[in-house]
């Protein structure tokens, strides 16, 4: 009696190595999006050519025996855009010409008097020696406000100038300010008796000088110390 014998046969399978798929040259007979334009020669997979491009005459094979069917064209490569440099903005500032303001007669007189005053003060000595008399024909225009700024509060005058007349006082003012004060607009009085007016100063001491302006209706008070 024979025994049933089970024979197990194992079939060993070996994986068949896949060959690398090579691309083939073809020529496009129509524009194909994402691939190329009509007349362009490109490389594609054989399956892509066989299953899609070859249908409806989208492309044709290129072999050693049969070359391109239509004139070959090259794809148009867009030229690189030129680098745009930022345009620098140029600001043009208008330069306005400075105009010289026109001076009135009063302003010109003030300016001349101020220049004379500065020139006289730079050369002035602490003690003024006066040796002048009344001068006729000088410009009698003057401003009380200008004299207030230009004249010192107290003058020191050498005793050698005694007696000190109104004419000599007018000379002092003229040398400092450039303005000639009429004698009728000058009043002299002792410091301790300001209402006792005198024609000239004959003794040592401190005296009050009043300069008035008929045009401005104002009076300036200064002092002289001999």
Image: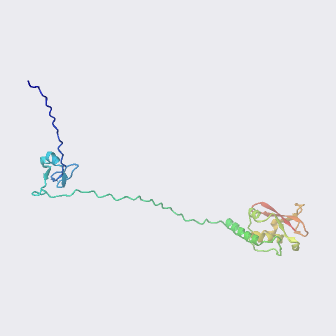
Estimate the x, y position of residue 148 in percent, counting from the top left.
77, 62
Front-lying residue, 67 or 95: 67
Estimate the x, y position of residue 101 in percent, counting from the top left.
61, 65
Query: Quadrant of the rendered structure where residue 197 is?
Result: bottom right
Query: Quadrant of the rendered structure where residue 196 is?
Result: bottom right
Residue displayed at 79% across by 63% down: 212
The vertical placement of 12 against 186, above or below, is: above
Q: How many marks?
A: 0
Front-lying residue, 167 or 84: 84
Estimate the x, y position of residue 174 in percent, counting from the top left.
77, 70
Q: How is the image coloured?
A: rainbow
Estimate the x, y position of residue 114 in percent, counting from the top left.
71, 67
Q: Residue furthest right?
A: 203
Q: Residue furthest left?
A: 1
Residue displayed at 79% across by 62% down: 220
Front-lying residue, 106 or 67: 67
């Amino acid at each position: 009696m024979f025994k049933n014998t089970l024979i197990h046969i194992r079939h060993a399978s070996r994986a068949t190595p896949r060959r690398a798929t090579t691309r083939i040259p073809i020529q496009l007979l129509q524009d194909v999006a994402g691939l190329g334009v009509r007349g362009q020669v490109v490389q594609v997979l054989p399956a892509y050519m066989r299953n899609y491009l070859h249908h409806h005459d989208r492309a044709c094979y290129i072999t050693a025996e049969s070359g391109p069917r239509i004139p070959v064209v090259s794809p148009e490569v867009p030229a690189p855009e030129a680098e745009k440099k930022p345009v620098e903005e140029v600001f043009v500032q208008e330069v306005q010409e400075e105009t010289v303001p026109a001076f009135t007669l009063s302003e010109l007189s003030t300016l001349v008097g101020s220049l004379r005053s500065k020139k006289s003060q730079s050369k002035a000595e602490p003690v003024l020696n006066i040796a002048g008399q009344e001068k006729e024909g000088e410009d009698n225009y003057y401003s009380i406000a200008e004299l207030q700024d230009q004249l010192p509060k107290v003058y020191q005058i050498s005793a050698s100038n005694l007696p000190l007349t109104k004419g000599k006082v007018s000379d002092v003012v003229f040398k400092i300010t450039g303005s000639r004060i009429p004698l009728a607009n000058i009043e002299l009085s002792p410091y301790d008796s300001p209402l006792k007016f005198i024609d000239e100063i004959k003794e040592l001491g401190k005296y009050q000088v009043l300069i008035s302006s008929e045009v401005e209706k104002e009076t300036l008070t200064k002092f002289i110390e001999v």
